[in-house]
Structure formats: C-alpha cells, structure tokens
Amino acid sequence: MRVAVIGAGIIGRLRAQAIRQGTNAELVGVMDPVRENAEEAAKGSSATIATGLDEVLDLDPDAVVISSPVHYHEEAVVGALERGAHVLCEKPLSNTVASCRRIVDSAVSNDRVLAVGFNHRYYPSIKYIRSVLEAGTIGDLDHVRVFGGHDGLGNFRADWQYKAPESGGGAMMDVGIHMTDLARHLVGEITQVYGIQSNRIWKVDGSEDNAVAVFQTEGGVPIAYEATWSEWKGYRFYVEVYGDKGMVRGYYAPMFNLLVTQTEPGGPRATKRLFYPQIILREKLKSWTSTALISFADELRDFSAMISGAENVPLATGFDGLRAVEVAEAVRRSSQTGEPVASMSVPRSDA
C-alpha cells in the first residue's frame, strides 16, 4: 500500500514513522507547508517531499493519512477521496457537523474507505474493558462514566488547537472527543444528550473549558460524561462501566485497569487490578509518544485490512467521526436551550 502523509507536526511525524516501520505500507510522500517538517517526517525513506496538497496527491497514493490542522481536514480529505485514495484522518474528523457530513458523503460517493484516528480504542486498558464486556463478566449494563481532561491551554502547541472557529470548540473537541467515541465504541450508539458547558476558566470565546453531560444509548444505558481543561492532576482519562454483577475501569495515564465482580448485587466481591509496568517505564524513558506510536501502527494495520474488505476491526469509521462531532454539537445545543437533544440525525452509513 503506497501511503502519503499530509501534515507533519508531532502527530504527523509519528504517523509517518508508523508507516516507515510497518511491513504492509510504503511511505511515498509527505506534505507540510513547512518543508523542514516534511523532511523530518520522511527521514529514512525515499518519500517525496511536498509543500502543497496537489503536489502530494499527484503522486497517486493508494491511501492518505491526514494529520493537518483540523480546519484544513475537509479540503485534504475530500481532495484525496476524489483522487481515488482511501483516507485515515486524525480526530476530530472536522470542525463542524456540516463539514463532517460533506466528508462522509464524499467517501460514500467515491466508494473509498474513510477511517478516523481514535487511537485510544487501541490502548490496552480500553481493550481490556471491551473484552470484559464481550465476555459478559459484569452482567447486564447499568450505567457508564467517562472522563477526560488536562490542566489547560499550556498543553497546546498552536492557537488553532484551542481557538474557535478553527478548533471547532473547546474541551469537547479536544480530549472529550475521544471520550464520546469510547462511550459509543464500548456500549453503543448515543441517541439523546443533555448537557451544560462553560468557559469561566480560560474565557476563550466559542471554546468551552468544561462540559458535563448525560448521554443515553439506544439501549437505554445512561452515560455520565465530563470533558475539562481545568483538571488539576494534568492529563488523564478514564472509562467506568457498571453492570449488575460488577464494574470495570480503564485508566490512562498511567495505564491501569480495575475489575470488581460479584455473583449478585450486594454479594461478596472479588477485585482484580491490572498494571502495565512496561508501558509506564517506556513512557518515562521515551514519553507518551511511544504508546501513541504503537496505537498508530495498530490503526495502520486495520486500515489496510478495511481497504481489503475486513469489517470486524476496532478502527473508527468516517461515520464514527461524524457521530462524535454531532454529539459534541448536541451538548452545545442542550446547554443553550436547557433541553435534552436527540443526537441521532443521520442514518448509519458504510463510510
């Protein structure tokens, strides 16, 4: 598979590294407006260096990985799809619902695979939750909690990452977009949203620094959701799923799992804790990017499989990317109106 990368910032360079180190793909081009960034991402390969979109698409890659700033996603994704390339786009899919819909429509009309880089699906603590749920270990689902946050604007490397309209919003479009996706990935489609958002901390117009919401799945399971840019502990996220026979928790960072089981409500409980010392040590020595790189390699493998026709892989689709942004928009609307919002507005597609 001949792959080009568009956008060679920190994430783009990791994406390019995953391609270079893989066995099922060849890095044929890297595009970034800053030539030095593209050269760094292509280092060790024979990839063509480009500074413009048409220049890299003229290489006729089989697939394109897009990690440019979010407000450039639509132009790059649609441009690649119309040239016949399959696309793996970094999250969020775009900065507005309307833009996401146009992207998904383009994937469908051009009959190309569109995937979205929700790489947290591949983190061991999340995969463990999924295995517990699939085994029925905690019984019938009762409720879910998802939380994602960090301590604010000092974590961003560029203004576009947090300033609307380029960013599409605040905490919900940043760390919160992962939490929305993980909720859907683990327990099903979100059909109703009630939420409140605020920006009393950083006061960035159009970019909430806190959002608290209750989601409801099509199966009636409630999900307590929080996305924040004022988390005093720094970057972290967790997912907790509760059933009538126990609960399972997945946490990062550091990577950690907790499983509590009981044969019946109120009965004796058994507790299991999973630690990941190799991951923790590796991140201390090489930073969080080492874990992200492994997840990017896993996504690339499944992207290739999806192109070959595989369906039963964890990789998020274009539809998943659209739904995550639609849910964020539903929280905004609910916060403005004080009313719950039905968040399901488009039929499921194959994109």
Image (cartoon, grey):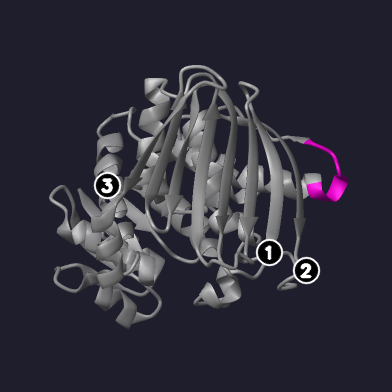
Dots 1 and 2: beta carbons under 8 Å?
yes
Q: What stretch is highlighted in magenta?
A: 335-340
Does 165 sit left or right of 65 as displayed? right
Position of residue 334 measured from the top left corner of the image (x, y, whole percent): 79, 44
Picture layout, residue 206 above or below residue 333: below
Q: Which of 139 and 55 is in front in this view?
A: 139
Q: Which amino acid, by three-letter code, is at mark 3?
A: Asp
Picture layout, residue 262 above or below residue 163: above
Q: Which of 167 and 77 is in front in this view?
A: 167
Residue at 52% across, 55% down: 74
Sequence order check, earlier mark of 2 and 3: 2
Circle 3 residue: 298
Sequence order check, earlier mark of 1 and 2: 2
Residue at 75% across, 50% down: 332
Q: Nearer the viewer, residue 186 or 317?
A: 186
Position of residue 48 measured from the top left corner of the image (x, y, whole percent): 22, 69
Would you say residue 4 sits in the magenta stretch?
no
Circle 2 residue: 200
Give the quadrant of residue 195.
top right
Circle 1 residue: 209
Picture layout, residue 296 above or below residue 161: above
Does 214 sit left or right of 321 as displayed? right
Does 14 sit left or right of 216 as displayed? left
Sequence order check, earlier mark of 3 and 1: 1
Residue at 52% across, 34% down: 241
Position of residue 249 measured from the top left corner of the image (x, y, whole percent): 46, 41
